[in-house]
Image (cartoon, helix red, strand yellow):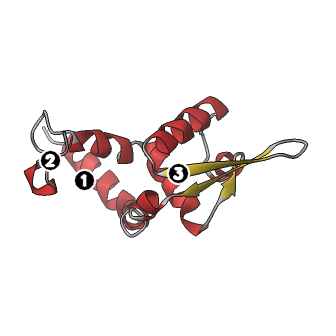
């Protein structure tokens, strides 16, 4: 049964909105969302752009994102078969947020490392 949006509170353990927070806070999901923000990509393209993601993890992550309605998958009959992924309307709704988080992380990692070092060196 659907509840009005105001009834959701992701701070509560039983809130279904936590599922989405778990999804979008996943590092691979967030990086794939950023990779797709400029437009559709062929299946192998995110693997070239995102260092460290294995083919298995790329496949699992894209399938999960497709299941959640964040990306669409289009297979074109050709030899070899061409598969493209694109953000759906729902996925595009994250565009203002995810690049901002990525930019914030890139801009502040040195400060975070400094804070960690200061914390770890406390008596």
The quadrant of the image that shows the C terminus is: top left
In this view, the residue farthest toward the top is 56
Q: Nearer the viewer, residue 90 or 37?
A: 90
Q: Disc number at residue 85?
A: none
Asked whether, in this view, residue 111 is left or right of residue 34, the answer is left
Pointers 3 and 2 in contact (CB under 8 A)?
no
Question: Residue at (13%, 48%) from the top-left corner?
Answer: 8
Residue 121 appears in the figure: no
Question: Residue at (23%, 41%) from the top-left corner?
Answer: 18
Disc 2 designates what residue? 3
Q: Secondary structure at mark 3?
A: strand
Distance CA(mark 2)–CA(mark 1): 41 Å
Q: Mark 3 or mark 1: which comes first in sequence?
A: 3
Q: Indicate the quadrant where residue 15 lies.
A: top left
Report crowding for label 1: few under 14, some 14 to 19, many 20 or more residues within 10 A (C-alpha): few
Q: Is residue 97 above or below residue 10?
A: below
Q: Mark 3 or mark 2: which comes first in sequence?
A: 2
Report crowding for label 3: few under 14, some 14 to 19, many 20 or more residues within 10 A (C-alpha): many
Disc 3 designates what residue? 71
Asked whether, in this view, residue 76 is left or right of residue 33, the answer is right
Disc 1 designates what residue? 115
């Amino acid at each position: 049964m659907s509840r009005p949006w105001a009834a959701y509170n992701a701070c509560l353990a039983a809130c279904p909105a936590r599922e989405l927070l778990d999804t979008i806070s996943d590092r691979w999901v967030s990086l794939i969302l950023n990779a797709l923000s400029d437009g559709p990509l062929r299946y192998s393209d995110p693997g070239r752009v995102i260092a460290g993601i294995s083919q298995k993890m790329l496949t699992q992550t894209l399938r999960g994102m497709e299941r959640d309605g964040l990306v669409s998958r289009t297979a074109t009959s050709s030899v070899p078969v061409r598969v493209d992924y694109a953000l759906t309307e729902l996925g595009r709704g994250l565009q203002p947020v995810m690049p901002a988080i990525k930019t914030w992380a890139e801009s502040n990692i040195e400060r975070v490392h400094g804070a960690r070092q200061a914390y770890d060196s406390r008596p």
